[in-house]
Image: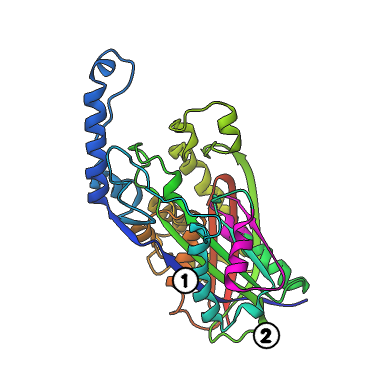
Amino acid sequence: MHRAVISGSGLYAAPDLISNEELVAAYNEYARRFNADNAERIAGGEVAALEPSSVEFIEKASGIRQRRVVEKSGVLDPQRMRPRLTRRPDEALSLQAEMAVAAAREALANAGRTAADIDLVICAASAMQRAFPAIAIEVQHALGIAQGAAFDMDVACSSATFALDLARQNILTGAARAVLIVNPEVCSVGLAWKDRDCHFIFGDVATALVVERADETRADECWEILGAKLATRYSNNIRSNQGFYSHCEDRDPDDRDQYFMQEGRKVFKEVCPMAAEHIAAHLADLGLQPAGVRRFWLHQANIAMNQLIGKRLLGREATADDAPIILDEFANTASAGSIVAFHQHRADLQRGDHGVLCSFGAGYSIGSLVLRKL
């Protein structure tokens, strides 16, 4: 049985930055026009008037101050309110693969690895640009990885952690020597930018990780995966019903049900205790206690969720050193969020320090990995 380590990570941040101020100005102009165009229907009770958004509302509700997206002009156009993308020819690299490849190159370089060393590629994200061929196979081809296999997987916001466990299992059993995981999260295309309650939530990034055998690593810094714990429980409180079936149901493309939806209060009430109990149980299985964990790299959905989970685990308010927050800069980036936190906030830890990488989201799904710096 082999030991599995994370030996490299990479991050690609989408090129366009949208501040809360810009987003609020665009949304409020859209709301003003909607209310003016529907004044009679609003007066008659047919539709509800749209309330304005504000920077204060966004930051209090989420802790988000800005987000990066693949294209901002369409999002900030009150007559459009969605990214403006150009369809690429079939022979061109897809947007999602392009982002994944950029993150992968950094991860490979950090691990001291090349395409010739990788024998499995997993593309794990909350939504894929297409059903087939797999984005992972496109990434494999673009990087020049001529051996092994590649496939896509989706467990919503837990996609990255579930993929990490799958990579770990392949290393432990000897099925693979080095695995590349990519998490290209283009969340802006599925966000209902016209919905005040969620128009600020998401941003776009891609992350990548190299997982390999501990006795073969070339990296100056690596993290042993001591254990993984996965759990799912069905709930549709976070959902998107868009898919191939939609056009057969004769749905309106602007149907609100086709975009990201959540029952925020229910999610907060149900997921926070689940995640805290999950992490505590996982640590106990390994003979560890939350107080002995140097850092928690938590899913970056909402600052209040992370604060509550941290307090339940530690019995006190978690500091930025205990559980770093990156959603103020990147917003919610679905499964990539905890990986971004790990990528940016691990260098100061010492050999022997323990950390927990954890995600939670739609499904419900929770994935945690306990790491130790070697």
Whether residue 282 is visible here, answered yes or no, is no
Q: Residue at x 26, y 33 (%)?
A: 31
Amino acid beneath label 1 = His
Residues in magenta, as a range? 133-162
Check the picture and name the quadrant holding the N terminus: bottom right
State the SS at label 1.
Answer: helix
Q: Residue at x 27, y 47 (%)?
A: 23
**Residue 287: x and y, percent?**
65, 69
> Does 147 appear in magenta?
yes
> Viewed as shown, does residue 245 lie left or right of 170?
left
Q: Residue at x 26, y 21 (%)?
A: 38
Task: Pick whichever of labels 1 and 2 is earlier in the sequence.
Answer: 2
**Residue 77: x and y, percent?**
28, 43
Mark 1 lies on residue: 343
How far apart marks 1 and 2 lie (CA) works out to: 21 Å
Could you say which quadrant of the image residue 278 lies in? bottom right
- Seen from the viewer's position, the closer of residues 216 and 277 is 216
Residue 216's disc is 2
- Seen from the viewer's position, the closer of residues 225 and 163 is 163
> Viewed as shown, does residue 229 lie left or right of 305?
right
Amino acid beneath label 2 = Glu
**Residue 332: x and y, percent?**
42, 53
